[in-house]
Image (cartoon, helix red, strand yellow):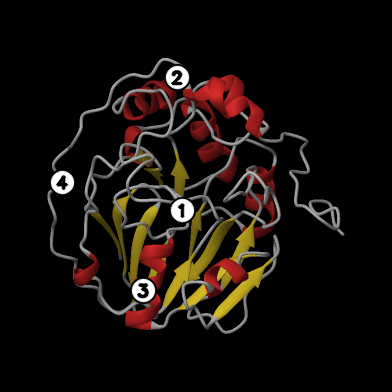
Amino acid sequence: MSDHFDGRRFFNPAGMDAMPFSKVPRMLFTRRTPWPRRVPVTRRPLPAVGPGDIAITWVGHSTFLFQTDRGNFLTDPVWSERASPVQFAGPRRVRDPGLSLDALPDIAMVLVSHNHYDHFDRSTLRVLEQRYHPLFVTPLGNAPLLRTVGARRIIELDWWQAADGTPVPVTLTPAQHFSARTPFDRNRALWGGFALQIGGRLIYFAGDSGYGPHFKQIRAQLGAPDLALLPIGAYEPRWFMQAIHMNLAEAVRTHGDLESRLSVAMHFGTIQLTPEGIDEPVRDLGAAAGELGVPPDRFRVLDVGESLLIH
């Protein structure tokens, strides 16, 4: 029992809950801006990482590769063609991953923020376990699903809990979202973001989240991130998405609430989950940043496959 768990299910303390499944058909029939069937991706060699350096490569959607002198880490790794229980139907990626699975370096740790199909890809996780036997770090309630892919080294965390025995210090942070793999397991597992201390720098990965007071709480408890990885896509229609996904104005406000030195956009332009066009998040991010006085170099958009090197 806690301020976000009633003994059976997790919930958002701010009172913003996801729409019930009965509203999903109405959302699915909202008029959609068509996406291209395929967008080419330029794959680039991974950067060399020296002592004290951090390289972060955007693989696509919410998947990032962290290269550090303490090991290599992945966030929400998804290499499958579809974010779906099956690979013959469901939301399909229009951009290939910016890095092939075979090009990955040795992976020491995998961070899994929650159990939605566009973040928890069993096929990819199974391959990672078979090849690297990494440490999996995830919110409470997700270990049973991880065990179905063969994962053996799992740490489950509650919000604000710091992990023991990870290559770098990791703390699970709150998020305003929900969990479900089916209509019958809603909110049985927790969701969240991750704060990592790497070489004296604070890196924050938000996972999926609607806008809420938790971002200022993260700043107050953990400090201002040197780098924040923030979602900017899948925000329409607002009547359905407001509780669980930020729009662009909210993403820029989150950048300010965190007092992030640099933010990088994610969760857009890879898989069409909602009605907005493929270019709308980037276009609207620039407009929102301008209206709120955030310089373009403080909230960046990477190309799929592009790396950011932090010395």
Q: Which percent across, then down, holds residue 213?
A: 70, 39
* Left or right: 100 as drawn, with respect to 31: left
Q: Which residue is mark 3?
A: 128
What residue is at 53 percent from the left and 80 percent from the top?
166
Identified by mark 3, the residue type is Leu
Give the number of the disc on residue 291: 2
Labels 4 and 3: the sequence-earlier one: 4
Residue sitting farthest toward the top: 31
- The secondary structure type at the circle numbered 1 is loop
Between the residue at mark 2 and the residue at mark 1, the CA separation in whole angstroms equals 31 Å
Q: Which residue is mark 1?
A: 119
Labels 4 and 1: the sequence-earlier one: 4
Labels 2 and 4: the sequence-earlier one: 4
Instruction: Place residue 171 in its image quadrant.
Output: bottom right
- The secondary structure type at the circle numbered 3 is helix
Identified by mark 4, the residue type is Val
* Left or right: 13 as drawn, with respect to 260: right
Give the number of the disc on residue 41: 4
The answer to whether marks 2 and 3 mark residues whose Cβ atoms lie closer than 8 Å is no
Q: How many marks?
A: 4
Give the number of the disc on residue 237: none
- The secondary structure type at the circle numbered 4 is loop
Q: Which percent across, then down, holds residue 140?
A: 68, 65
Labels 3 and 1: the sequence-earlier one: 1
Labels 2 and 1: the sequence-earlier one: 1
Residue 122 vertical placement versus 249 (above, below): below
In the image, 30 versus 280, the foreground residue is 30
What residue is at 46 percent from the left and 44 percent from the top?
230
Crowding around mark 2 (Cα neighbors within 10 Å: few <14, some 14 to 19, many 20+) is few
Q: Which percent across, then down, holds residue 292?
A: 48, 24
